[in-house]
Image (cartoon, rainbow, N blue to C red):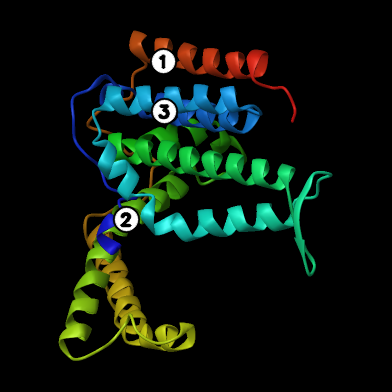
C-alpha cells in the first residue's frame, strides 16, 4: 500500500495542463473545490465527474495511477460513509436497531459524501502530478506576495510546503525499506489484533523519525552552506508569466462554478 501513495510526486509532461502557470492551476483547483461542494444534485456530481475526467485526459495522467492513489485514504472514505449512514437524521427510516437508525436521507448523504471526497482528493492530487515542487513553491509565493506588506512570511510558508511535498515520496520509500528490513528479521505486521499491530509499528516509527530528523538537519546545513537567506533579493531562473492559455483556463474555471450555481444548486 505504501507504494500506492503518490502524493507529492511529479510526472513530467508537455501537455496543456503541464504548461499552465502554477498560479493558474492553484486557482483552478480552488474553483474545482468550490464547484464540487456547491453541487447538490446527482446531475451536478455527474457534471463535476465529467470535468475531472476531462482534466485527467488533458494531462495524460494514467487513470490507474490516480485510482491507486485513493487506496491509502480508503479507510477515511469508508469511515465517513458509515458516520453519514448511521448519524444522519431523516423521516424515511429504513432500518432501526439499538440507538442506530438507517434512513433514506442518510444513505443519499453517504453516497454524495463518498463521491465528493473521492473527486476532491483525485482533483487535488492532479495538481501535484502536473506541477513540479519548485513551480508550486513559486506559484504559492507569488499569490501570497501581497501579504508581505503586513510582514506575512510568504516565501517561508511556500518553501515549507514545497519541502514537505518533496519529501513525502522520500519518506515513503524509507518506510518501505525499514519494513522490508524488519520483515527480514522476522517482524510480523499483518497478524494479531489492532493493539498488537500498533505495537509492531514501533520498530518502524523510531528509525523513521530518526531518519527524518537527520535528513532535515542535512538539508538545513546544505541550504546554509549555499548562503540561503530566504526570499529577499532572490532571483529565479524562470519568471512566472500569465499567457493567453492561462486566462482561457481561468475563464473555464469561472464558467464551471457559474454552471454549478445556475443548474445544480437545488437543495435536497
Q: CA distance from mark 1 to mark 3?
A: 14 Å
Counting residues from the start of the chain, the first of labels 1 and 3 encountered is 3
Q: Which residue is mark 1?
A: 249
Estimate how packed mark 1 is, as few (under 14), some (14 to 19) or many (20 or more) residues with alpha carbons within 10 Å: some
Q: Which residue is mark 2?
A: 5
Counting residues from the start of the chain, the first of labels 3 and 2 encountered is 2
Circle 3: element type: helix
Tell me the quadrant of the picture where the C terminus can be found.
Answer: top right
Could you say where residue 42 lies in the image, as x and y percent from the top left? 59, 27
Q: Which residue is mark 3?
A: 52
Circle 1: element type: helix
Of residue 179 and residue 116, the one placed in the foreground of this image is: 116
Estimate how packed mark 3 is, as few (under 14), some (14 to 19) or many (20 or more) residues with alpha carbons within 10 Å: some
Q: Say which residue appears at 53% left-offset and 12% top-offset.
A: 255
Determine whether 19 is above or below 195 in the image.
Answer: above
Q: Say which residue appears at 54% left-offset and 33% top-offset.
A: 33
Q: Say which residue appears at 57% left-offset and 22% top-offset.
A: 43
Could you say where residue 57 lies in the image, as x and y percent from the top left? 29, 25
Query: Taking the image as drawn, is residue 39 in sight?
Result: yes
Circles 2 and 1: CB distance less than 8 Å?
A: no
Q: CA distance from mark 2 to mark 1?
A: 28 Å
User: Which of labels 2 and 1 is toward the front?
Assistant: 2
Determine whether 4 is above or below 261 in the image.
Answer: below
Q: Residue 208 is drawn in which quadrant?
A: bottom left
Amino acid at each position: 500500500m505504501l507504494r500506492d501513495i503518490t502524493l507529492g510526486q511529479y510526472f513530467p509532461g508537455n501537455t496543456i495542463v503541464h504548461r499552465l502557470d502554477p498560479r493558474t492551476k492553484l486557482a483552478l483547483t480552488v474553483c474545482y473545490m468550490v464547484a464540487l461542494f456547491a453541487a447538490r444534485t446527482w446531475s451536478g456530481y455527474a457534471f463535476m465527474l465529467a470535468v475531472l475526467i476531462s482534466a485527467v485526459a488533458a494531462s495524460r495522467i494514467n487513470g490507474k495511477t490516480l485510482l491507486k492513489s485513493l487506496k491509502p485514504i480508503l479507510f477515511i472514505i469508508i469511515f465517513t460513509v458509515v458516520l453519514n449512514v448511521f448519524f444522519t437524521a431523516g423521516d424515511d427510516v429504513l432500518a432501526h436497531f439499538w440507538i442506530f437508525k438507517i434512513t433514506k436521507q442518510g444513505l443519499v448523504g453517504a453516497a454524495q459524501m463518498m463521491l465528493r471526497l473521492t473527486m476532491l482528493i483525485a482533483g487535488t492530487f492532479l495538481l501535484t502530478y502536473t506541477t513540479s515542487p519548485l513551480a508550486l513553491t513559486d506559484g504559492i509565493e507569488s499569490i501570497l506576495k501581497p501579504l508581505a506588506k503586513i510582514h506575512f512570511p510568504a516565501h517561508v510558508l511556500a518553501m515549507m510546503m514545497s519541502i514537505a511535498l518533496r519529501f513525502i515520496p522520500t519518506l515513503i520509500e524509507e518506510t518501505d525499506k525499514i519494513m522490508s528490513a524488519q520483515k527480514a528479521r522476522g517482524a510480523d505486521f499483518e497478524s494479531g489484533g489492532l493493539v498488537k499491530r500498533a505495537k509492531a509499528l514501533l520498530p518502524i516509527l523510531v528509525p523513521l523519525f530518526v531518519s527524518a530528523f537527520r535528513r532535515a538537519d542535512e538539508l538545513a546545513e546544505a541550504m546554509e552552506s549555499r548562503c540561503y537567506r530566504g526570499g529577499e533579493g532572490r532571483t529565479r531562473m524562470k519568471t512566472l508569466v500569465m499567457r493567453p492559455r492561462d486566462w482561457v483556463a481561468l475563464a473555464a474555471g469561472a464558467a464551471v462554478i457559474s454552471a454549478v450555481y445556475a443548474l445544480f444548486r437545488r437543495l435536497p
